[in-house]
Amino acid sequence: MSIKYAILGLLSWKSLTGYDIKKLMEDSAILYWSGNNNQIYKSLLQLLGDGLVSSILEQPKSGPSKKTYTITDKGQNALKDWVLTVPEAPEFKKAFFVQLAWSGVLNDEETMQLLCKYEEELTLQLAYQKEKHERRKGYPDRNEKEIFLWNKMAENAISSCKFEIDWVKSVRTELLEQTKKGATQT
Amino acid sequence: MSIKYAILGLLSWKSLTGYDIKKLMEDSAILYWSGNNNQIYKSLLQLLGDGLVSSILEQPKSGPSKKTYTITDKGQNALKDWVLTVPEAPEFKKAFFVQLAWSGVLNDEETMQLLCKYEEELTLQLAYQKEKHERRKGYPDRNEKEIFLWNKMAENAISSCKFEIDWVKSVRTELLEQTKKGATQT
DNA sequence: CAAACCATGTAAGCTGTTACATGATTTC
DNA sequence: GAAATCATGTAACAGCTTACATGGTTTG
């Protein structure tokens, strides 16, 4: 469950509440989880049970009570150990490809419309990623290297979208050419 | 559960057993599931319950008994309806980025080694994708459009790997330059 | 005074993986 | 005769999402 290490990483930057973590995850291009309560609050309890974080309950005079979590030395070590583990290859889950795979049941116009809709989704996604990158609010910037890597990763997210848009555009134009050729031949 | 439609799609091509489907999924770059029994056999039972497929139990004189599944008219319609639904944007789950995000705890050499290992994983992945594409055994090729699209999708899988490799290479060289600069300045 | 936000948590359910269980047949 | 393949299925569990439940505070 690498979400635990995502949380641990955020806490290595500064002490946070569950709610803070939720917000940071929602707004992050890199920490790709949805930021739902269930996972976050459960993970925090587990981290606490494992002694990787400690918590302080605060009861301000005004406002709701909150638990602030802080990483422990044991947590810092666990994080470093995990960071050094052999990385996994990325997972590209392109559900649309499953759809496109069976587009044999469609006519040319329907296929084109499907490709267009995919491009629209990607364009939305791209705008979303760019916005996240430009806001860039409330994220670690402890040193030059960290700033550099976070920027590079955000750029990667943006370029991945662009790459996919270019791909779908090329498929559309090539498909159009094929259709024309087929029409003139018959 | 889009795996049901992945299965339905395969059955729209030809009648298959659960075991056939398992093998096809394992070897496919597009149908990204692991091809585990649990999901496939359960999905087939559900599809049967919904009347989207029919099954015939065969008991050959030699060899194990097998159930061959065939798509029904209702199944064909359900597939086409699903293919025409609004596509989702792809999910890029790059677990490595979570690791790299907290590489602030590492020194420069450790960071470099981490990036190198990621590149190795990607290189393996690329070879795997290429091999899948070259074998290209036992997949639908009902018409020119279908062949074209399947090729384009396989190329996309390969190019996505290449894109990621290029990214990690550029990060490595830029990071090396920064380290040198920092070293000469101090 | 309604909507949005702060803040914590729980319940139910879907998706997906690894591993287990069984048994026949084919290949080396 | 051991290992791989064909063929079906189940059990246990990890991961993730939506929605529910509660209640105070701030903003428009």
Image (cartoon, coloured by chain):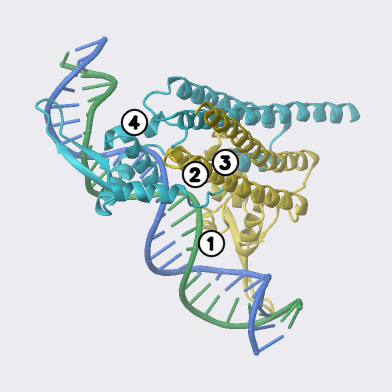
Chain colours: A cyan, B yellow, C green, D blue
For label 2, the residue is B95
Crowd tier of the residue under label 2, counting other residues whose Cα lies within 10 Å: few below 14, some 14–19, many 20 or above: some
**Amino acid at circle 2:** Ala
- Alpha carbon of mark 1 to alpha carbon of mark 2: how far? 29 Å
Q: Which mark is residue B41?
A: 1
Residue displayed at 62% across by 27% down: A162
Residue displayed at 57% across by 55% down: B34
Label 3 vs 4, first from the N-terminus:
4
**Amino acid at circle 1:** Tyr
Task: Name the residue nearer the viewer: B136 or B48.
Answer: B136
Which image quadrant is residue D25 in?
top left
Nearer the viewer's eye, disc 3 or disc 1? 3
Q: Which mark is residue A95?
A: 3
Query: Which element carries disc 1, helix, strand or loop?
Result: helix
**Amino acid at circle 3:** Ala
Residue B66 in sight in this render: yes
For label 4, the residue is A23
- Alpha carbon of mark 4 to alpha carbon of mark 1: how far? 39 Å
